[in-house]
Amino acid sequence: MNIEYVAPAEIEKRSMAIISDELERRGILLPDETADIVKRCIHTTADFDYAETLCFSPGAIAECRRLIRGGALLVTDTNMALAGINKRELERYGARAMCFMSEADVAEEAAARGITRASVSMERAMRREEPVIFVIGNAPTALIALQEQMDLGHYRPAFVIGVPVGFVNVEAAKELILADDIPHIVNRGRKGGSTVAAAICNAILYGMRGQQG
């Protein structure tokens, strides 16, 4: 194969065109509402399975945008996901992103209680006053902690982006969220990751450019 020179500014545009062409060849027609998000996940992973496995609750995109415009807090389960989210776009709407995973007292509490740092981090996020969009790309225990509090009637997330990757409890944790009626974007199966979680957030933010209200 020959190496083709592509101007840096054109690489993403060319990549998205390739993705669109391949989806068409595969006979996959994405709904307009979710197409940009699915394509950005494929762009991040080079994995076309996301066209089949990424699940959206009714009105998910509009609801997530509404929350961001209202200054919601995005809480991630990894600093990698936090680093990947476009903060400048968030700031347009007075929204912020945080991750509690590296805080020393989170690690200490998790060790003392025999639970994961992700679980403790979710508990911290649940104590926030503003609406929280949970952005989970790594830890299924984060989703399980959320579901446990929902089942007890103690807390209800404003929105969940649930795309943890792995093998232990990953699929079951995702299905818990899918079975509930909270607004969500969840990728079924084992695939996902922090980069995918950030890609979903950024696709939503980029789709808000130029929109009013």
Image (spheres, rainbow, N blue to C red):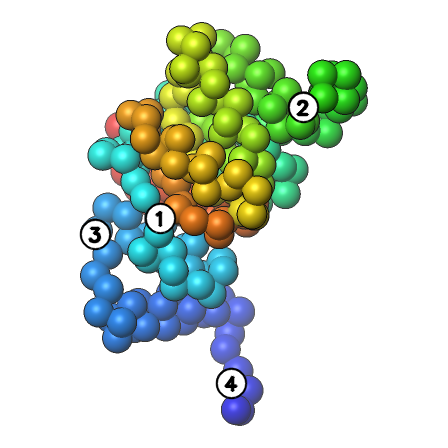
Which labelled disc corresponds to residue 87?
none
- C-alpha span from label 2 to label 4: 50 Å
**Amino acid type at image mark 4:** Glu
Q: Is residue 185 left or right of residue 57?
A: right
Q: Judge whether residue 65 can be spotted in this image.
A: no
Residue hosting label 3: 31
Q: In the orientation shown, which residue stands out farthest toward the bottom?
A: 2
Q: In this view, does 57 lie to the left or right of 77?
A: left
Q: Which of marks 3 and 2 is nearer the N terminus?
A: 3
Q: Quadrant of residue 153?
A: top left
Check disc 2: other Cα within 10 Å, few if <14, some if 14-19, many if 20+. few
Q: In this view, does 126 lie above or below 41?
A: above
Q: Which of marks 1 and 2 is nearer the N terminus?
A: 1
Q: Earlier in the sequence, mark 1 or mark 4?
A: 4
Which structural element holds mark 1?
strand
Mark closer to the observer (4, 3) = 3
**Amino acid type at image mark 1:** Leu
Residue at 29%, 68% in the rendered image: 23
Residue at 58%, 16% in the rendered image: 123
Circles 3, 1 touching at the beta carbon (< 8 Å): no
Mark closer to the observer (1, 2) = 2
Position of residue 61 measured from the top left corner of the image (x, y, whole percent): 30, 37
Q: In this view, does 20 lie to the left or right of 116?
A: left
Which labelled disc corresponds to residue 115?
2
Residue hosting label 4: 4
Q: Earlier in the sequence, mark 2 or mark 4?
A: 4
